[in-house]
Amino acid sequence: MTTTPAPELVDGPEPRSEHVGELVYRHRLTTRLWHWTNAVAIVVMLMSGLMISNAHPHLYWGEYGANFDRAWFNPPSFPGWATIPSTYNLALARHWHLFFAWVFAWGLFAFLIASLVNRHIARDLTLTRREVSPRHLWQDVKDHLRLKFPTGQEALRYNPIQKITYILVIFVLIPLLIVTGLSLSPGFDAVMRWPMALMGGRASARSIHFICAGGIASFIVVHLVLVVLAGPINEVRSMITGRYRVPPDPEPVVVEEPA
């Protein structure tokens, strides 16, 4: 087994063809720590959030929302195995939710600072003009629908769909989730009310928070499915040790001409 200590390959830089089939150092420690911290925090927040939803499973738009107001959506009652705690306890669910929300928020802040310092964002998430061209994007969509995973040098770079998804999640969905969650806290609302006013009121903030949480949950499901399809051992190892085995390009098919 050959392990190539190539720090220039970390987090999606320009690869070299001789690394194909070998183990390369793909993910920095900061990326791995943020990933697993998020994994724990998000699971706890989603499960405790379901318990909070069970306390009043109705969503409204506007300043206020109560039992006799018209709800735009009525989430189902979630079973105990999907909630934290497993039995009805709104106060404890809020404690779990708020604690891990701060873990999640400060983890994002630390990751962004580290990614600016090591240029992970500028280097690996910046979309080139070629990548955003309709033809290139459409080809990337077709490859994803066919479950055609990148190999060789392409496997060490984020593809356009990945970049767009990560940009939307990191810079739109997660910040909106944090801001709406903070706006639901009376303490934060007393200090800074303009985010809630911008969203149209507490009921609207709660609805947007629920939608963002659903978006995060959907992202996780798709992410896990793709990890399994792409090769879970290689993908999980890269996020634990940082080492990733570069999948080789398929062998070209040689058609022999009849004699």
Image: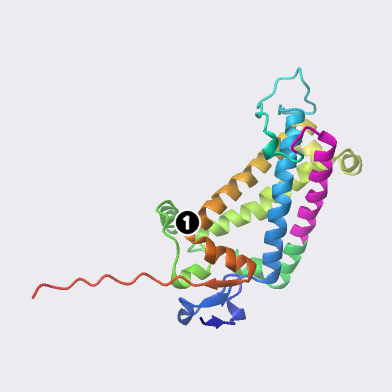
Circle 1 is placed at which residue position? 229
- The answer to whether 22 is drawn above or below residue 234 in the figure is below
Q: How many marks?
A: 1
Q: Is residue 123 left or right of residue 226?
A: right
Q: Quadrant of residue 60?
A: top right
Q: Is residue 71 magenta?
A: no
Overall secondary structure of the magenta section? helix
Residue sticking out furthest to the left: 259
77 or 185: nearer the viewer: 77
Coordinates of residue 193 in the picture (x, y in percent): 86, 40
Coordinates of residue 195 in the picture (x, y in percent): 80, 42
Coordinates of residue 75 in the picture (x, y in percent): 66, 29
Q: Is residue 155 left or right of residue 174?
A: left
Q: Is residue 96 magenta?
A: yes
The residue under the point 84% across, 43% down is: 95
- The answer to whether 137 is drawn above or below residue 49 in the figure is below
Q: Is residue 201 visible?
A: no
Numbered disc 1: secondary structure: helix
Q: Is residue 20 left or right of residue 123?
A: left
Q: Is residue 95 visible?
A: yes
The residue under the point 51% across, 72% down is: 245
The residue under the point 66% across, 25% down is: 72
Residue sticking out furthest to the top: 68
Q: Amino acid at mark 1?
A: Leu
Which part of the image, by quadrant, shows the C terminus? Answer: bottom left
- Find the magenta span and give its range: 86-109
